[in-house]
Amino acid sequence: MRKRRAARELALKFLYQAEFNSDDPDSELDPFFEMANVSEEIQSFTQTLVKNLLTHEKEVDELLKKISANWALDRMAVIDKNILRLGICELLFDPATPPKVVINEAVEIAKKF
């Protein structure tokens, strides 16, 4: 598996865990990485994705609410919602990754999970 795909999947797993367990997701990143046992490169990109999303969560969620017709965020499956959040966040706040790559990665991860 490519490193960036592994980082995106790890970010998704972290966000899933944080959805149920955390008042302060930032404080849970280090213990999460210890358990994940992944390379520094994967950790770094995962951390970038998660911190970007946590920083812009309200903005991303507002956009997601606007574009998801007849679906409230609390009705969406946690995995689906977080795949969409990660994709939107990467599209908006990581101009280094081409949009077609972000979309393809989100689709492939959605197929897997």
Image (tube, rainbow, N blue to C red):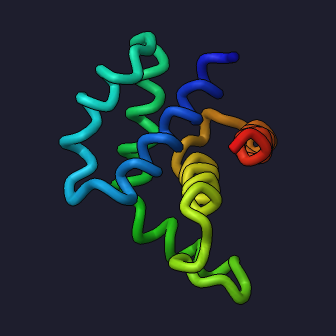
Q: Do we see residue 82 in this rendering?
A: yes
> In the orientation shown, which residue stands out farthest toward the bottom?
70
Left or right position of 10 against 48: right
Point out the image quarter for the N terminus: top right
Regarding residue 92, the answer to whether it shows in the image is no
> Does residue 63 appear left or right of residue 99 in this picture?
left
Q: State the residue at coordinates (46%, 51%).
A: 16
Q: Judge by depth and name the residue closer to the eye, 43 or 91.
A: 43
Q: Left or right: where does residue 21 sit relative to residue 3? A: left
Side of 10 relative to 84 (left or right): left
Where does the image place residue 62, in percent across and percent down from the top left?
51, 77
Q: Nearer the viewer, residue 56 or 40?
A: 40
- The image shows residue 24, relative to residue 57, as above or below, that is above
Give the image location of residue 44, x and y in percent: 40, 23
Percent position of residue 67, x then y: 69, 77
Position above or below: 10 against 40: below
User: Residue, x 40% and y 22% (percent of image)?
Assistant: 36
* Residue 8 drawn at (x, y percent): 57, 35
